[in-house]
């Protein structure tokens, strides 16, 4: 083997050993505290080494309810204050209605056990940025 080939091989091995930034797919194994497994033969990544992006943090908005007092101004027949009108606001994403829980429309749910996530490995594998959920491709 020539010197140039040997140097090239050493350079490749050094780069592989330094673990440059790359993408990984992981599975959420615990939601609270957050743990994500990227390899079944390794301990899961703990919350302390995970940075969450906005796309994997829960976002919700309240469903508005309106109380209306109805006055009969035409006949002077009285007032009704017991009518509760609730707006049936439905938000859709990818053709699916977003869930409503405890009076809130869930725009983006929190990570749950079993979710597949896309991770960006940084700092030579010491930290991971959780970029987004990974959806199974459908045909």
Image (cartoon, rainbow, N blue to C red):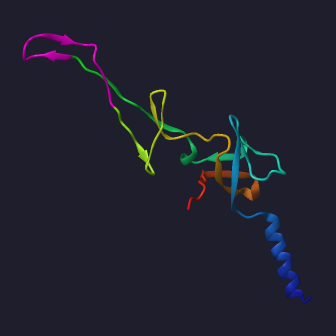
Q: In the shown orientation, is residue 31 left or right of residue 90?
A: right
- Reply above or below: 50 against 87: below
Q: Position of residue 30 (x, y in %)?
A: 71, 38
**Residue 73 included in the magenta stretch of the image:** yes
Q: In the shown orientation, is residue 100 left or right of residue 9?
A: left
Q: In percent of the image, x 9 and y 11: which residue is there?
A: 76
- Reply above or below: 136 against 10: above
* Front position in the image: 118 or 96: 96
- Reply above or below: 57 against 136: above
Q: In percent of the image, x 83 and y 81: which residue is there?
A: 8
Q: Residue furthest bottom?
A: 2
* Front position in the image: 15 or 42: 42
- Reply above or below: 2 against 17: below
Q: Position of residue 88 (x, y in %)?
A: 35, 33
Q: Position of residue 47 (x, y in %)?
A: 70, 41
* Front position in the image: 99 or 138: 138
Q: Residue furthest right?
A: 1
Query: Which quadrant does the C terminus fall into?
Result: bottom right
Q: In the shown orientation, is residue 6 left or right of residue 20?
A: right
Q: In percent of the image, x 75 and y 56: which residue is there?
A: 125
Query: Which quadrant does the N terminus fall into?
Result: bottom right
Residue 105, by quadrant, is top left
**Residue 67 included in the magenta stretch of the image:** no
Q: Position of residue 73 (x, y in %)?
A: 9, 16
Q: Which residues are magenta?
A: 70-87
């Amino acid at each position: 083997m020539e010197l140039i080939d040997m140097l090239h091989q050493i350079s490749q091995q050094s780069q592989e050993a330094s673990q440059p930034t790359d993408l990984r797919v992981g599975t959420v194994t615990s939601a609270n505290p957050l743990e994500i497994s990227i390899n079944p033969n390794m301990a899961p990544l703990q919350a302390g080494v995970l940075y969450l992006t906005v796309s994997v943090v829960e976002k919700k908005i309240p469903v508005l309810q309106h109380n209306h007092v109805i006055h009969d101004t035409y006949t002077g027949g009285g007032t009704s204050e017991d009518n509760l009108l609730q707006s049936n606001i439905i938000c859709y994403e990818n053709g699916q209605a977003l869930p409503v829980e405890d009076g809130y429309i869930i725009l983006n749910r929190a990570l749950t056990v079993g979710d597949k996530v896309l991770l960006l490995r940084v700092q030579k594998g010491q930290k991971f940025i959780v970029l987004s959920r990974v959806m199974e491709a459908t045909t």
